Image: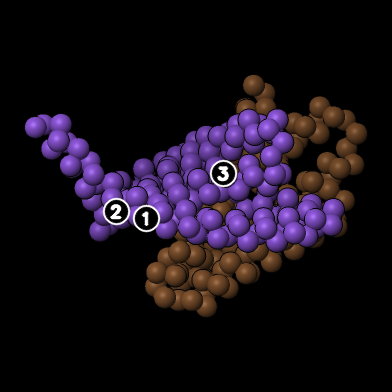
Chain colours: A brown, B purple
Amino acid sequence: MLAMVLVFIGGMIGSVWRFWLSGLIARRFGETFPFGTLAVNIVASVLLGLVSGFLAHLADRPLSTALQQLMAIGVCGGLSTFSSFSLQTWNLLLERRWLPAILNILVSTALCYAGVVLGWQITG
Amino acid sequence: MRKYSLVAIGGGLGSVLRFGITQWMAPLHSWPFAAILLINISGCFLISFLNFLSDPSGEIYLGPNSRVFLLVGICGGYTTFSTFSLISFNAARHGAFLDLILNIGLSHLLCLLAVWLGAMAAALFPPMVVHLIRWLRT
């Protein structure tokens, strides 16, 4: 039950953060390319790398589990999104903008992977 | 402010649903990427179905608040890119490069396929409901 509450609170924080940050970036850089979703996914991946590296050192099991549920599953999971990413890629494909669509997939995958590695290198 | 509360509640619910599915699939000892893959595929189907169903040109109207709650909150909180990246990284760390390639390839391919199916379902759903209601009346 505590696990559900922690994931719920983390998911609330992460999702509100995503809504705010992706909106901010979309207003700043325009919506011709989904920069907002790309940015939140990168931020979430760096944060998840940091949290995972930190948790790998933590000896206290119950605290480690609680932190994983709140931060990794809740905040990082709520902050990042695959559904908006795929829908936006699909919309680029519908508009026959092949290069931005392929770039969205490649850049998202590469930078989010690099983000996890970066976070993990710092704390792991 | 109303929109932020809706995103918060939807995101919390979506995250708990994602957590529940991973917990439920954990004892099955399936392919380690299966749970997140399944979650992302189903979330992509749902966001596409709801998006195209409530399109300005679509048949069913969803207000801006409902769209934010369902698409940004529930679907956004339910699916995840960060865990997808972390499990890819873990596969690479353990030298499971085939798993790494499969996870990335299948995720992108099947999620786009799910978006396409969601759009198809959204196009077929309103006429089917109309037919069903007519059939029930006769």
Amino acid type assigned to the residue bearing label 3 in the image: Ile
Q: Chain of mark 2?
A: B
Residue receiving disc 2: B123
Q: Counting residues from the N terminus, which is met first, the one under dot 3 or under dot 1?
A: 3
Instruction: Using the image, determine if residue A9 lies above or below residue A85.
Output: above
Residue drawn 88% across the image and 30% down it: A60
Q: Position of residue A59 (x, y in %)?
A: 90, 34
Whole-angstrom CA distance, mark 1 to mark 2, is 6 Å
Q: Is residue A27 left or right of residue A80?
A: left
Which residue is at the far left? Answer: B138
Residue receiving disc 1: B119
Instruction: Using the image, determine if residue B8 lies above or below residue B57.
Output: above
Specify whether residue B39 is in view: yes
Q: Position of residue A113 (x, y in %)?
A: 72, 61
Q: Is residue B15 left or right of residue A124?
A: left
- Depth check: give the residue in front, B67 or B22: B22
Residue drawn 47% across the image and 53% down it: B114
Q: CB under 8 Å between callouts 1 and 2? A: yes
- Depth check: give the residue in front, A101 or A38: A101
Q: Is residue B9 left or right of residue B34?
A: left
SS under mark 1: helix
- Depth check: give the residue in front, B124 or B90: B124
Q: Chain of mark 3?
A: B
Residue receiving disc 3: B39
Whole-angstrom CA distance, mark 3 to mark 1, is 18 Å
- Depth check: give the residue in front, B34 or A73: B34
Q: Quadrant of residue B12?
A: top right
Q: Counting residues from the N terminus, which is met first, the one under dot 3 or under dot 2?
A: 3
Q: Position of residue B76 (x, y in %)?
A: 52, 47
Whole-angstrom CA distance, mark 3 to mark 2, is 23 Å
| Circles 3 and 1 on the same chain | yes
